[in-house]
Image: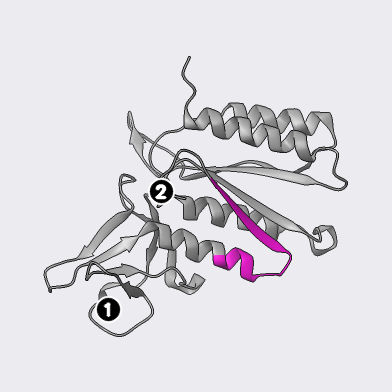
Amino acid sequence: FNLTKLDDAKTAAKNFITTVMNAPNTRVALVSFASAYTENGVTSATVTKHTDFLDVSQLANRETLNAAITGLIALGGTNTQAGIRRADQLFNAVLSADRADNNHMILLSDGLPTQSYKIKDTYLTLNTTNDTFVFSDDDNYYTAPNLPVIKFDYDTTIGPGSSEFETIHNGWGNDYFYNHSNSAISQAKMFKDVSDSRTLWTIALGTSSHGN
């Protein structure tokens, strides 16, 4: 049978657990992300926490993680920002006394971000000099890759989950767009800026050079 990109991601995740299981004091958690979508009248969760941090030296914990990985399915779009934010919350929830000296987030994805959180007051900043947008070579404006947490409305998602870009406004000579990839980059910077002990690794499966 033909393996999918999700199959490759599952294999990579399971191999990672096997690789680190003998490393001392290593704990692993699992978060999956897609996009908010509705099928048969049921709306899906954008992001799911499958496990808290588990000590992978314990066989039972490895089995729990591997079972969660096996059960992953690919539906909807890709809200990478939501996945990064939820994983960041798991790191922040660990009590100070239990925090590791080195904290790594590994982002596995098979496509470009196609959904992200709403950015506040985008209409108020159209056609003005501000840090919400960056000007692109195509003579249009896109939401920036370095926005702080206060810029985002985390109760609202933008985009149907089918495109990297979402129109905010057009018709003034320069068009304005959400760039879902840039929102994911902003969220990644928030995670890393907390501490020098934090590192975020990205693994793109079957994407173009742009997606990587």
Mark 2 vs mark 1: which is more N-terminal? 2
Instruction: Find disc 1 in the rendering and name its residue.
Output: 124
- In percent of width and height, residue 17 lies at 73, 36
At label 2, the amino acid type is Leu
Query: SS of the residue at dot 2?
Result: loop
Residue 154 is at least partly visible in this image: no
Query: SS of the residue at dot 1?
Result: helix
- Residue at x-position 40% and y-position 52%: 210
Q: Give me the disc on residue 115.
A: none
Instruction: Find disc 2 in the rendering and name its residue.
Output: 112
- In percent of width and height, residue 98 lies at 83, 57
| Magenta part of the chain | 189-203
In this view, the residue farthest toward the bottom is 129
In this view, the residue farthest toward the top is 1
Q: Residues within 10 Å of mark 1 (few under 14, many from 20)?
A: few
Please tell me whether residue 192 belongs to the stretch shown in magenta. yes
- In percent of width and height, residue 142 lies at 31, 67
**Mark in front: 2 vs 1:** 2
Query: Quadrant location of residue 59?
Result: top right
Residue 150 is at least partly visible in this image: yes
- Residue at x-position 22% and y-position 80%: 127
Please tell me whether residue 67 belongs to the stretch shown in magenta. no
At label 1, the amino acid type is Leu
Task: Please determine whether, in this image, residue 199 is positioned above or below residue 141.
Answer: above
Q: Residues within 10 Å of mark 2 (few under 14, many from 20)?
A: many
In this view, the residue farthest toward the front is 209
